Amino acid sequence: MAAVKLQLPGTPDGAEVEVPEFGTFLNGSTNPVEDWQVDQWLAQNEDRVWPKDGTLVLPESTPDPAPVVDATPVATSTPDVTPPTTFVIPDGGDS
Amino acid sequence: MATDIMATGFMGLAFEATAGTFLAPTKFFPIKSENLDYVQSTQWRRVIRGLADNIGGIQGNSNIAGDITVECLPDVIPYFLHASRNTFVKSGITPFTYTYTPYHGANPQAARTLSLTVVRNGVTFGYTGCIVHHLKFTCGNDGVLWATFSIVGRDEATQTLPTATFANQSPFGAGMYTIGVPTGSTVLDVDSFDINVNDNGKPEWRLAAVRTPQFVRFGQRDVSVTMKRDFQTRAEYDTFKTLTAQSIRIVAANGASANFQFTAAAAVKDPYNVNGLGNQGDIVAADLTWMGTYDTSTSKAYEIIVITTESIT
């Protein structure tokens, strides 16, 4: 059964809080909601899913930031390194 | 996304733990209007190279600016006052009394910047690093008290669409006002009033690896109260000519748990315009503006007190 739980930090427990399209509930309470209300919420939040445990807690917490992707290209081949030139110093002999 | 009307939009806010880092809204509030904008100073390339055209743009400094007008709900305005140039003292236990005292430094208080979320046609805009630098409280003859908060902030990015919640609070309206000119002497001739506290906030950019402001700050403060009053005697008019300071207080009260109070302890009238004679049926009235000056007795130019059941730390 889907539910909406209210835990507004600044609002006194027991105060009336309206959640548009869900109803008016008391802060601190957990309230069952209908499937059509969940469907409506999902329609408005196309990129999200209803919480797995069935209870939407309001206000919602800040989503975790997206993982940082390292955009640095990864080397896949041996770098082309020119071997150092070897200089042969001729034996100067006596000059 | 289909076209939609503005009625479907909403706003919320949260205090930031780190200035400029977005946090999802914890408080939602009904608004009359908002015009928050991402502003960028694009530098256009008008260089001489044989062409009459604009060659292109160079990204310039950017910031957030705009106004939010809300019903002056006692559970909402303390959040904005917390983000203004005021320190506050919280007292009492449900209802709480918040006493706001202006300070003079340029910097916003730590952990008092706001993340503001605006949903327009289902699209979420998250504004970060926002402070309130101009407070305006307006009441017309209909008795409805409106608050306009001017915002300056750092940056904007899209965010997850939040689910809004709204506390069931009543706005201030007709029959809830006590206006003292001077404080303690209730007057019954006020038609409308405006309260303005402008701290002239500005974004401050520095040459760095980002285009957003390094910080936002306050400037000089301008405090004023404007009223339209019936003109009956010369008494007030004469004290305008002598620039005599007086205390004024405006109180809006909706029961014991919802109260808004503004006091300017050393207000000086200027200008005082007695309306010229014109239409036969009009009441002879006057438009007054008080400049709020620094009061050496109370050590402040103004004070705001809000009584509400909302608990903010």
Image (cartoon, rainbow, N blue to C red):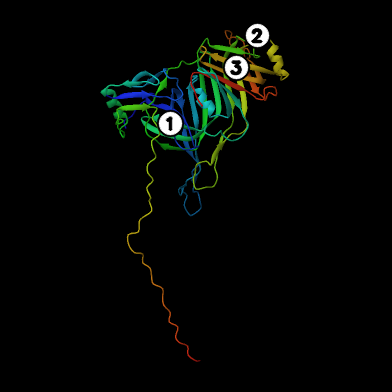
Question: Which label belongs to residue B117?
Answer: 1
Mark 2 is surrounded, within 10 Å at the Cα level, by few (under 14), some (14 to 19) or many (20 or more) other residues, namely few
Closest to the observer, B223 or B252: B252
Q: Which subunit holds the residue at mark 3? A: B
Question: Which label belongs to residue B227?
Answer: 3
Residue B58's place in the image compared with B158, above or below, is: below
Q: Which subunit holds the residue at mark 2? A: B
Select label 1 or label 2 by which is in front.
1
Mark 3 is surrounded, within 10 Å at the Cα level, by few (under 14), some (14 to 19) or many (20 or more) other residues, namely many
Residue plotted at (47% across, 88% down): A92
Marks counted in the figure total 3
Q: Is residue B168 left or right of residue B197?
A: left
Mark 1 is surrounded, within 10 Å at the Cα level, by few (under 14), some (14 to 19) or many (20 or more) other residues, namely many
Q: Position of residue B277 (x, y in %)?
A: 63, 12
Q: Position of residue B2 (x, y in %)?
A: 31, 30
Closest to the observer, B165 or A30: A30
Q: Hey, which residue is sitting farthest bottom in the picture?
A: A94
Say what secondary structure mark 1 lies in. Answer: strand
Residue B62's place in the image compared with A18, above or below, is: below
Q: Position of residue B284 (x, y in %)?
A: 62, 10
Residue B270 seen in the current view? no
- How far is disc 1 from disc 3 in space, using C-alphas? 34 Å
Nearest to N terminus: mark 1 or mark 3: 1
| Residue type at the position of mark 3 | Met
- How far is disc 2 from disc 3 in space, using C-alphas? 15 Å
Q: Is residue A84 left or right of residue A95?
A: left
Say what secondary structure mark 2 lies in. Answer: loop
- How far is disc 1 from disc 2 in space, using C-alphas? 48 Å
| Residue type at the position of mark 1 | Thr
Question: Which label belongs to residue B232?
Answer: 2
Q: Quadrant of residue B290?
A: top right
